[in-house]
């Protein structure tokens, strides 16, 4: 290199030197260090890259000093760089003087596809090409002449799928691995046929429609003539007056119950009730919906304990409490336990219901283990006696409760009450029946008394009945 010539990179671009800066030593540039690190063939350089500072035959060079580039003529277009000529030793798919483009089986996709083919039985284990071929080893510098390619010839890439072994074109090489195609497994969703003598699989349940029927559609679905006849049979056989119940809800629930019992309609259901006493009891339970439990909606009972019970205990006399629609007695016994836990309190509890059968079970005050879900172990030990896998209420709670049958729509109400609980009962009545009940409940309470309703219920016009909301589900009489 001439003294007045600037040092150049392998791309023939000159290196800019600051005043007083010496040219870099051979092998100190980043490109030459990469060549020394990743080069193959023992020469320590990248393919086609030579150092402008080294001498022929020294490590890190290509064995020849590059010629001085011609000075371009001003205004002339630079000549295109000629493409490298492939040598006779260059194999198929091998770049001139570089590393192999691809080794068959080297990618993750090919290895996964090959294992899937073995698992699916598309190729036999132990057959030719039954293992992923290893990477070919690089040639050493001592065994390769200076003119040989820097890397070993790469094995030809085998296609993942091929129609035939003889369909290869000229210049391509067929792999020893069997050809297979990548294919997503298909799930067989067909239901298998039942074995001989086995029962047929149950049909799938119909999916509920996304748009529920509107109240007008529900009302239109009622056969009013049949409903009138059904209501008359219910009143004569069961003693229930359905005239103030919500007709669409009762109709829909009764028709569904009739279908479950194998009847065509509610008229046939009631005709069977004339002779089937068990079915008559089931129909009574279906209409009255005797579903409850101890401490149902615990948050609501906690609000009653903190917001109402302390004031009632300060009166210095027994609390007058009415449980309207008491079902199996869960509600009155829940309140009785709360009073006893408060300490020093007492209560006179009236528990009423329309269903005589349910009242008989409530008077027995014996509950199975599954009915005691809401009762803690401490309360079970304190207020119940366990006998033969059942739980019997202790006498100290039984003595607080008086049981009575009552029809809320026809029978008179008690008076001068401190607390009334009527939870999840009036939701099945018409709006006119609800208003009448709320007005009568208010009159049955003393001034300052409290009405306790269900967690999902609300009295929209409470002030018109003389009630004021204390908290969710609790209303106090103010006048």
Image (cartoon, rainbow, N blue to C red):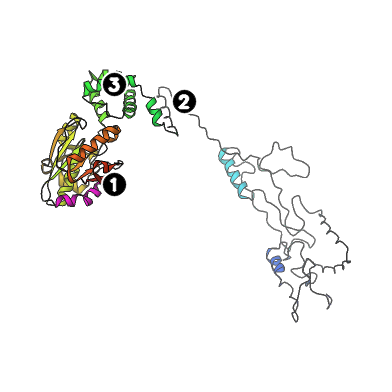
Q: Nearer the viewer, residue 267 or 194?
A: 267
Snapshot quadrant of residue 62: bottom right
Does residue 290 appear to the left or right of 208 in the view shown?
left
Determine which residue is flagged by label 2.
Answer: 193
Q: Which contiguous range is marked in magenta? A: 295-314
In the depicted view, which residue is nearer to us: 425 or 130? 425
Foreground mark, 2 or 3? Answer: 3
| Residue depicted at 71% across the width and 38% down the height | 165
Q: Residue 230, which numbered label?
A: 3
Q: Read off the residue under disc 1.
A: 472
Residue 128 drawn at (x, y percent): 64, 42
**Front residue of 474 and 55:** 474
N-terminal of the two: label 2 or label 1? 2
In the rendered image, which quarter contains the N terminus?
Answer: bottom right
The correct choice, above or below, for 269 with respect to 355 in the image is: above
Front residue of 398 and 368: 398
Residue drawn at (58%, 37%) of the image: 121
Q: Are marks 2 and 3 in contact (CB under 8 Å)?
A: no
Q: CA distance from mark 3 to mark 1?
A: 37 Å
Callout 1 secondary element: loop
Which secondary structure, mark 3? helix
Confirm or deny contact between disc 2 and disc 1 (CB under 8 A): no
Task: Determine the main secondary structure of the stretch shown in magenta.
Answer: helix
Quarter of the C terminus within the rendering: top left
Disc 2, SS: loop
The answer to which of marks 2 and 3 sits earlier in the sequence is 2
Cα distance in 3D space between marks 2 and 1? 55 Å
Marks 3 and 1, the one that precedes in the sequence = 3
Q: Report whether residue 265 is seen.
A: no
Residue 120 seen anywhere in this rendered image of the structure? yes
Distance from Cα at disc 2 to Cα at disc 3 = 44 Å
């Amino acid at each position: 290199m001439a003294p007045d010539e600037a040092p150049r990179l392998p791309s023939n671009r000159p290196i800019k030197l600051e005043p007083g800066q010496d040219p870099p030593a051979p092998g100190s540039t980043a490109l030459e260090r990469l060549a020394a690190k990743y080069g193959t063939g023992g020469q320590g350089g990248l393919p086609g890259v030579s150092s402008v500072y080294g001498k022929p035959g020294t490590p890190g060079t290509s064995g020849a000093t590059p010629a001085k580039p011609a000075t371009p003529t001003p205004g002339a277009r630079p000549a295109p760089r000629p493409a490298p000529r492939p040598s006779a030793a260059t194999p198929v798919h091998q770049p001139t003087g570089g590393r192999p483009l691809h080794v068959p089986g080297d990618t993750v996709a090919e290895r996964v596809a090959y294992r899937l083919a073995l698992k699916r039985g598309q190729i036999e284990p132990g057959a030719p090409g039954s293992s992923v071929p290893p990477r070919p080893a690089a040639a050493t510098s001592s065994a390769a002449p200076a003119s040989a390619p820097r890397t070993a010839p790469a094995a030809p890439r085998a296609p993942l799928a091929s129609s035939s072994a003889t369909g290869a074109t000229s210049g391509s090489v067929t792999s020893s691995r069997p050809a297979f195609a990548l294919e997503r497994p298909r799930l067989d969703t067909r239901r298998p046929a039942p074995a001989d003598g086995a029962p047929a699989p149950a049909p799938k349940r119909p999916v509920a429609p996304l748009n529920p029927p509107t109240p007008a559609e529900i009302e239109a679905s009622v056969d009013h003539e049949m409903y009138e006849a059904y209501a008359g049979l219910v009143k004569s056989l069961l003693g229930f007056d359905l005239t103030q119940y919500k007709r669409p809800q009762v109709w829909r629930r009764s028709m569904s119950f009739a279908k479950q019992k194998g009847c065509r309609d509610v008229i046939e259901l009631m005709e069977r009730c004339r002779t089937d006493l068990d079915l008559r009891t089931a129909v009574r339970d279906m209409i009255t919906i005797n579903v409850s439990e101890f401490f149902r909606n615990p948050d609501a009972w906690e609000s009653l304990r903190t917001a109402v019970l302390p004031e009632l205990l300060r009166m210095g006399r027994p609390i007058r409490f009415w449980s309207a629609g008491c079902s199996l007695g869960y509600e009155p016994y829940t309140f009785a336990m709360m009073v006893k836990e408060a300490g020093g309190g007492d209560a006179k509890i009236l528990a009423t219901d329309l269903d005589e059968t349910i009242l008989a079970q409530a008077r027995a005050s014996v509950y199975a283990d599954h009915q005691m879900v809401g009762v803690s172990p401490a309360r079970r030990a304190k207020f119940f006696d366990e006998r033969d896998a059942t739980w019997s209420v202790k006498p100290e709670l039984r003595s607080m409760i008086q049981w009575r049958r009552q029809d809320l729509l026809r029978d008179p109400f008690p008076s001068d009450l401190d607390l009334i609980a009527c939870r999840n009962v009036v939701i099945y009545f018409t709006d006119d029946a609800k208003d009448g009940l709320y007005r009568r409940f208010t009159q049955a309470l003393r001034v300052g008394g409290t009405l306790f309703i269900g967690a999902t219920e609300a009295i929209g016009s409470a002030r018109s009945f003389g009630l004021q909301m204390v908290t969710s589900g609790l209303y106090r009489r103010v006048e």
